[in-house]
């Protein structure tokens, strides 16, 4: 019998997942299309590998095991799986078609909606993935400024200009690597010391889990403007989640360009670039960034319906409230157990990360322990709370009940140095995204 969302006696049976995985290895390289969904981020041997279906905030794997999901498609399911209003909009558009030989009116309708809610959306451009629009933003910034260098902070996709400064940069010419530089979040002085007439743009995630220091984002916008450098907000995670108009609305700071993808269409593939008209006008003649599927109508219909749902149900407020409750309860529990030095729940409530650190212990082993224990209790977890509108108070209560049972066991395992002996699957793998070092260079270096 398949496991459900309860304190199950055994870890879930994942025989069908294993079978699909072996089939996939014969024909797919790599086995996953997104590293965050791949088997390296879930304990091999005990965690499911393939999901069959989802509803609300719950998913079922190919073996029929049910889980409460805190990954939510690695971000796009801001509302939840199979939301009737969004599905109905997709199905209604499907009656008329998907991709056409001319432009579709939805391209205009959705752009008008985005213009009204995103502070810098003087002009709107569509694509399919986040990497597409961040790269388009960097390209048009270079064209507009006549400069080449890029300063970046965060994760911005798989294209050469960004991946060249990560630890996984084989195949990228040295000349491209030499044009991108990283800086530490909240380190305004390093940017001031390095910003010069060669820097086309500064691109960053407005926040990841660390909160901006008072005035950091506005000061960054000011020094970029003074230097003739364009400021780009990569709002893949913040857009439509921290506020309907994203981080620009939440913090009251306008970027020259901004990029969006996760959350805007509740799982349908859509990416959005917004920005100043004088910059975006370069796409008319001088800068090329076009794709056959940019105006695909099902995703645009989903986006229109998703934003309408978000407005009607005040989704950003709901994500904040649900996430804050979970974050506060976890923090109180860790304090009650005397584990605040070992674990914390950090970030803005709409998307929090749980950290694990103990002297003499492998942090990945601690995280693997937590993931394994949560899987047995029917919770699919990758170290984050990616909140959705569909997470109910009952879901949150159950999650805290699970944490309250697991954390004392982790504490004992740490004290007796036996964490890894409890693991029935493989250790989780580190994600490659981390850059080798902050390599921003001062002026005249």
Image: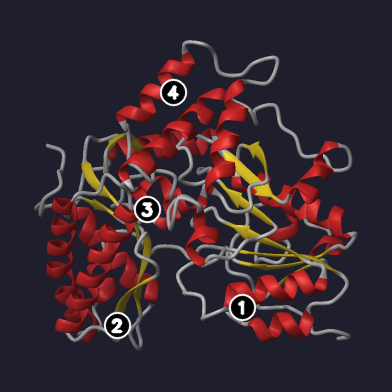
Residue at the disc numbered 1: 184
Toward the top, the furthest residue is 95
Marks 3 and 4, how far apart in space?
23 Å
Marks 2 and 1, how far apart in space?
24 Å
Residue at the disc numbered 2: 342
Residue 90 is labelled as: 4
In this picture, residue 44 sits left or right of residue 174: left
- Please determine whether, in this image, residue 355 is positioned above or below residue 4: below
Number of callouts: 4
Residue at the disc numbered 3: 316
Residue 254 is labelled as: none
Q: Residues within 10 Å of mark 4 (few under 14, many from 20)?
A: many
The first of marks 3 and 2 along the sequence is: 3
Q: What SS does tag 3 mark?
A: helix
What is the x, y in percent for residue 33? 53, 43
Q: Are marks 3 and 2 in contact (CB under 8 Å)?
A: no
Marks 4 and 1, how far apart in space?
41 Å
The first of marks 4 and 1 along the sequence is: 4
Query: In front of the other: label 4 or label 1?
Result: 4
């Amino acid at each position: 019998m398949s496991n459900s969302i309860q304190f199950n006696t055994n870890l879930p049976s994942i025989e069908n997942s294993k079978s699909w995985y072996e089939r996939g290895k014969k024909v797919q390289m790599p086995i996953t299309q997104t590293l965050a969904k791949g088997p390296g981020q879930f304990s091999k041997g005990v965690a499911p590998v393939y999901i069959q279906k989802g509803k609300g905030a719950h998913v079922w794997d190919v073996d029929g095991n049910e889980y409460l999901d805190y990954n939510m498609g690695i971000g796009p399911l801001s509302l939840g799986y199979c939301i009737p209003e969004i599905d109905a909009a997709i199905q209604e558009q499907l009656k008329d078609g998907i991709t056409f030989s001319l432009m579709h009116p939805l391209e205009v309708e959705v752009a008008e909606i985005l213009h009204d809610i995103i502070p810098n959306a003087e002009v709107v451009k569509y694509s399919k993935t986040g990497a597409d629009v961040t790269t388009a933003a960097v390209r048009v910034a270079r064209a507009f400024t006549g400069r080449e260098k890029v300063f970046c902070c965060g994760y911005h996709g798989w294209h050469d200009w960004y991946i060249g400064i990560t630890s996984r940069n084989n195949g990228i010419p040295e000349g491209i690597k030499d044009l991108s530089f990283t800086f530490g979040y909240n380190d305004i002085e390093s940017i001031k010391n390095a910003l010069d007439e060669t820097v086309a743009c500064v691109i960053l995630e407005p926040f990841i889990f660390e909160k901006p220091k008072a005035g950091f984002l506005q000061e960054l916008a000011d020094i970029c403007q003074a230097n003739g450098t364009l400021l780009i907000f990569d709002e893949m995670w913040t857009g439509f989640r921290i506020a309907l108009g994203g981080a620009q609305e939440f913090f009251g700071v306008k970027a020259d360009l901004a990029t969006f993808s996760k959350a805007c269409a509740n799982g349908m593939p859509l990416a959005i670039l917004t920005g100043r008209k004088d910059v975006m006008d370069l796409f008319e003649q001088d800068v090329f960034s076009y794709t056959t599927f940019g105006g695909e109508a099902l995703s645009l219909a989903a986006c229109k319906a998703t934003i309408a749902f978000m407005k009607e149900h005040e989704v950003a407020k709901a994500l904040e409230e649900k996430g804050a409750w979970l974050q506060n309860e976890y923090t109180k529990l860790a304090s009650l157990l005397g584990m605040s030095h070992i674990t914390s729940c950090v970030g803005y409530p709409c998307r929090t990360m749980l950290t694990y650190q103990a002297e003499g212990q492998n942090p990945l082993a601690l995280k693997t322990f937590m993931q394994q224990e949560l899987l047995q209790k029917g919770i699919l977890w990758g170290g984050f709370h990616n909140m959705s509108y569909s997470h109910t108070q009952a879901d949150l209560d159950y999650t805290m009940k699970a944490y309250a049972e697991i954390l004392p066991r982790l504490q004992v395992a740490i004290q007796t140095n036996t964490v890894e002996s409890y693991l029935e699957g493989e250790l989780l793998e580190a994600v490659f995204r981390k850059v080798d070092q902050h390599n921003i260079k001062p002026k005249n270096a």
